[in-house]
């Protein structure tokens, strides 16, 4: 299933037009993020956009604060938008542990937060950036420690961020194949290119070996492939080029 992280279109309002554009481009699903369900009006607008275009929202990102402190609200949103899997997408620099034990404990913290959502039938996991692959001063790899501390956490692997973190995604895919339930599909521009887009590229137009990585992900049963570009200068260009490329992998 080819999905689209709606965060990619945050700078190209209105979101209703993005829903229409994505449906016309051939997408069947989208992934939500915080601004789309910031309040009841936003939830209803998102729900209406899905209904009008036939798109589904099987996966969604929720902040750690919301997941830990507003579980009834998260569950209501997930039910309203018919989500299946919930992912915590980030933790700010000031809140990040600095030791292996700290990251292990953070994984346990996520595991605890997951209980209420799993009890209601939702998958629950983590979405990575690059910092999880940069060793701490005591030599620990945060992503590894998180998963040791949270033994049942799912993983939405963001392949391009794994690479930017200095790691080999194929090695990590093989190691944690039983945890990966979704993947962010985005690309990295050649060194020095696309500075106005923070060095990212449209899927299939960068340096990531997506044919090999997509094959590895499909081989372990991943179904949710979420196209993303953190800062496209043209969201329609990105969305259409990404799905065209992905269908060829």
Image: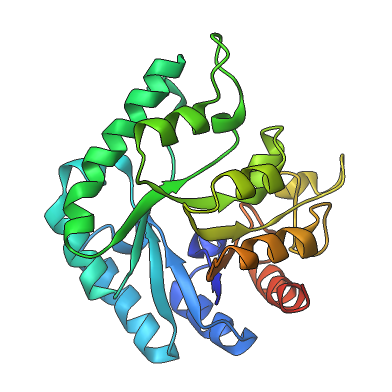
Percent x, y for residue 182?
51, 61
Pick the front one: 136 or 61:
136
Q: What residue is at 22 percent from the left and 71 percent from the top?
A: 79
Rendered residue at 23%/42% (across/down):
113
Quarter of the rendering occupied by the N terminus: bottom right
In the rendered structure, the answer to whether residue 187 lies left or right of residue 193 reads left
- Measured as percent of width and height from the top left, residue 29 is found at 48, 77
Front-lying residue, 43 or 244: 244
The answer to whether 104 is drawn above or below residue 33 in the figure is: above
- Residue in view at x 70 percent, y 48 percent: 170
Q: Quadrant of residue 209?
A: bottom right
Which quadrant would residue 31 be assigned to in this image?
bottom left
Which quadrant does the C terminus fall into? bottom right
Kindly tell me whether residue 160 is visible in this rendering.
Answer: yes
Q: Residue 183 lies in what quarter of the image?
A: bottom right
Q: Is residue 20 above or below residue 63?
A: below
Where 22 falls versus 96 (above or below)?
below
């Amino acid at each position: 299933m080819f999905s689209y992280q709606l965060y990619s279109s945050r700078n190209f309002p209105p979101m209703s037009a993005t829903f229409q554009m994505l449906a016309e481009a051939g997408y069947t699903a989208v992934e939500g993020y915080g601004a789309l369900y910031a309040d009841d009006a936003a939830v209803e607008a998102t729900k209406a956009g899905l209904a009008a275009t036939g798109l589904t929202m099987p996966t969604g990102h929720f902040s750690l604060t919301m997941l830990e402190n507003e579980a009834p609200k998260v569950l209501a949103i997930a039910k309203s938008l018919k989500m299946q899997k919930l992912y915590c997408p980030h933790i700010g620099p000031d809140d990040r542990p600095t030791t292996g034990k700290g990251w292990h404990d953070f994984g346990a913290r996520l595991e605890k937060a997951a209980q209420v959502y799993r009890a209601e039938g939702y998958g629950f996991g983590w979405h990575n950036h690059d910092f999880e692959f940069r060793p701490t001063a005591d030599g620990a790899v945060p992503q590894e420690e998180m998963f040791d501390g949270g033994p049942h956490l799912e993983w939405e692997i963001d392949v391009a961020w794994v690479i930017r973190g200095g790691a080999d995604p194929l090695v990590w895919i093989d190691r944690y194949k039983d945890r990966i339930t979704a993947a962010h599909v985005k690309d990295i521009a050649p060194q020095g290119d696309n500075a106005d887009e923070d060095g990212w590229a449209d899927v299939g137009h960068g340096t990531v070996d997506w044919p090999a990585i997509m094959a590895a992900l499909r081989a372990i049963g991943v179904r949710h492939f979420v196209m993303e570009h953190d800062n496209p200068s043209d969201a329609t260009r990105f969305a259409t080029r990404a799905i065209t490329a992905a269908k060829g992998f």
